Amino acid sequence: MRDASTHLPRTIALLEQGRHSILHPGAQLYVSLHGEQIADAALGEARPGVPMQPETLTLWLSAGKPITAVAIAQLVERGRLTFDDLVGRHLPEFAQHGKGEITIRHLLTHTAGFRDADKFAENLAWEEMIARICATPLEAGWQPGAKAGYSTLSSWFILGELIRRVDGRDPGRYVREDIFEPLGMSHSWMGIPDERSGGYGERMAMMHYSGRTEFRVHPFWNAAEDFAACRPGSGVRGPIRELGKFYESLLAGVGAPNSGSARAESEMGVTKALLKPSTLHELITRQRTGMFDHTFQHALDFGLGFLVNSNRCGAETVPYGYGRHASDATFGHSGSQSSCAFADPEHQLVVAWHCNGQPGEPRHQKRAREINSLIYEELGLG
């Protein structure tokens, strides 16, 4: 487990306790502070009888959403899109049934308002999924941008289709070539090609439902056909240490507090800046502040594709937060009842963790709040 047991013994003990409490069979934890790796740990089982390792590929679910957001931002920098483009400009069939005024910014801030499309089965073929989403009407009484409601899947498929239409590559190939490979995220994928997935074998962790007395394997996410599926809002897989590397690259672009300029890429070993500092700033700062989210039933702050620390909305009640001690500028995203990744510019801290058990929202929210808070406390940042 590297040095996690030295620097974060209580956090590791908390994750171990979660195994015995039937919260998760296994877990991965990656932490860096000021560019120095503090933890690259794994514990428990990736699948029955197979130990979880730091190099095990885990399913990040919605913790992968910011990768799609960064891809869109890269296309903005290249002049192919703007955040305020109407989606229908690039995808004309989307504009039907009242959705003509929805912009890319609305998709990224979860203020678009066609959440009925989130109910479609995840295993639909890409073309059918896009057609069904485009045919879904705007929610009654919804004014895009004036009302908020988190989109689990549908907005992100549309963002993926925008990548495909303006760039020519499918989103899985795009993020592999323009994000993962430049950062050395060699085992991260938004859809693993068949010729590669077989080679991973037991390195592929299973996702489980966590009951009070037993774990149940998820019926779809662990199937071979899902490994290859491209889901821009929920389907990225890789070792959690590589998601940490993604956030280290972003933190390098943010710059140290009050520095007035981006930190040198070499300071954190970043091989290539993903975005210009001005573009990154727009993604990770509040574009939506204090709005009540009608999906989460709680006020939340969002950047563009990133969930910004929303403790100001209730540190003990905010869903998918970053713990009690995160600074106001902390940005990141979490995966449904399973994972969390974020960067805290004030403390120059990166945290990424995954638990391969979904225990229900109340138990997960408590687990996440305690993990994130304890990391800060053990590092003397609390």
Image (spheres, grey):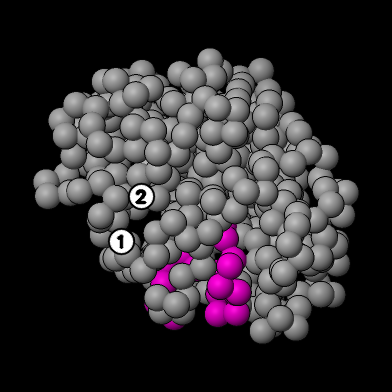
Identify the secondary structure beneath mark 1: strand
Q: Tell me how many marks there are.
A: 2
Residue 283 x, y percent position in the rendering: 54, 50
Which residue is found at the position 49% from the left and 20% from the top? 166
For the residue labelled by badge 2, is the local secondary structure a helix, a strand or a loop?
A: loop
Would residue 85 appear left or right of 40 to someone viewing this image? left
Using the image, determine if residue 290 lies above or below residue 381.
above
As drawn, which residue projects farthest toward the top? 168
Q: Earlier in the sequence, mark 1 or mark 2?
A: 2
In the foreground, 150 or 129: 150
Residue indicated by mark 1: 293
Q: Quadrant of the N terminus?
A: bottom right
Please state which amino acid type lies under the numbered disc 2.
His
Foreground: 236 or 32? 32
- Residue drawn at (53%, 59%) of the image: 285
The quadrant of the image that shows the C terminus is: bottom right
Residue 175, image quadrant: top right
Mark 1, other Cα within 10 Å: few <14 / some 14–19 / many ≥20: some
- Dominant SS of magenta comes to loop
Q: Residue 110 bears which disc, if any?
A: 2
Amino acid at dot 1:
Asp
Q: Which residue is at a point 27% across and 30% down the rendered structure image? A: 133
Q: Position of residue 208 (x, y in %)?
A: 49, 51
* Labels 1 & 2 near each other (Cβ < 8 A): yes
Q: Where are the magenta residues, as a range?
A: 316-333
The answer to whether residue 351 shows anywhere in this view is no
